[in-house]
Image (cartoon, rainbow, N blue to C red):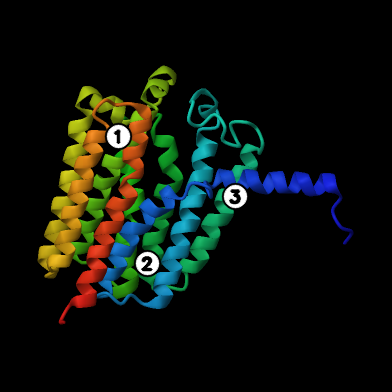
Amino acid sequence: MPPLTGGASSLLSARIRAYLRLIRFHRPIGTLLLLWPTLWALWLAGDGHPDPKVLVIFVAGVFLMRSAGCAINDFADRNIDPHVARTRDRPLATREITALEALAVSATLALIAFILVLQLNTLTILLSLVGGVMAASYPFLKRFTSLPQFYLGAAFGWSVPMSFAAETGGVPVTGWLMFAAVVLWAVAYDTMYAMVDRDDDLRIGVRSTAILFGRWDRLAVASAHLGALLLLAATGLIEGLGIWYFTGLVAAAALAMRQQALIRNRLPDDCFRAFLDNNIFGMVIFLGLVLHFAFAGV
């Protein structure tokens, strides 16, 4: 095969960069927000020692499915993104890539993730099919409902029952409590994310909880954070988790209060900073779980 000429090589590099932007490779926050609940569930289901094979499959699956979700999201929003300040530079909005390419990227990544899941038990495979449907359908809901953040939470939280199923062969009550906690946590952080775009969304007719809650948006975010933390506390009590875990929850509560201060004036940049802060929220809860199992019985 002859080597690529300079012009062809430059075009290929530009196309690869566009694909990486499509899947938000340069913005890992979405992957991290999906990863932390997955790790919570794997550590709890595995009593602090998740199966290495399961761990690798789920970490890879988180990256693949988040990337696939970004691609299908941009396909769904290809006629909206050019009119929103935050998204007008996305590769589909700028026509750097076609809608068909975005669909192909999403389908390919989702297929690879499903092939990985096929290495696990039947229940996990069945649950993954439900998760795939939610991930593919979420981007279209903002046209029909003012509560797309709840559906996003379910899609992001679905890794929790999948993790329990992969580790234990079933999903206990605490697995569903943790799932519900993730749904509420996603409502909190994605409402703050939607507050960034609220003016643009009102202008073009896109729906969100930030618009639905209106001047009660901060109260709604606080209530969602509180509900998530209470469900996680109930999970800890039922599972007999100790001081390290609950210290992690206290740290997460402090972060939630800091986010309230950030969004007080509803400035887009501050709301986005509060959204990003949820990466640390998820991390401190995971750290509490890790320390609990590390020092259990010591």
Q: Residue at x 36, y 61 (%)?
A: 127
Looking at the rendered structure, the kind of residue marked 3 is: Val
Disc 3 on helix, strand or loop?
helix
Asked whether, in this view, residue 79 is left or right of residue 211, the answer is right
Query: Residue 236 vs residue 124: left or right?
Result: left
Q: Where residue 217 sits in the image (x, y, percent)?
A: 23, 29
Mark with earlier residue (3, 2): 3
**Which residue is disc 1 drawn over?**
147
- The residue type indicated by label 2 comes to Thr
Quarter of the image with the C terminus is bottom left
Q: Where does residue 229 sit, x and y in percent of width and height?
A: 17, 51
Q: Position of residue 156 (x, y in %)?
A: 35, 51
Real-space Cα separation, disc 3 to disc 2, in angstroms: 24 Å
The secondary element bearing badge 1 is classed as loop
Do tag 3 and tag 2 residues touch (Cβ < 8 Å)?
A: no
* Contact (Cβ within 8 Å) of mark 3 with mark 1: no
The outermost residue toward the top is 203
User: Looking at the image, is mark 3 or mark 1 earlier in the sequence?
Assistant: 3
Residue topped by disc 3: 105
- Residue matched to label 2: 124
How packed mark 1 is, by other alpha carbons closer than 10 Å (few <14, some 14-19, many 20 or more), is: some
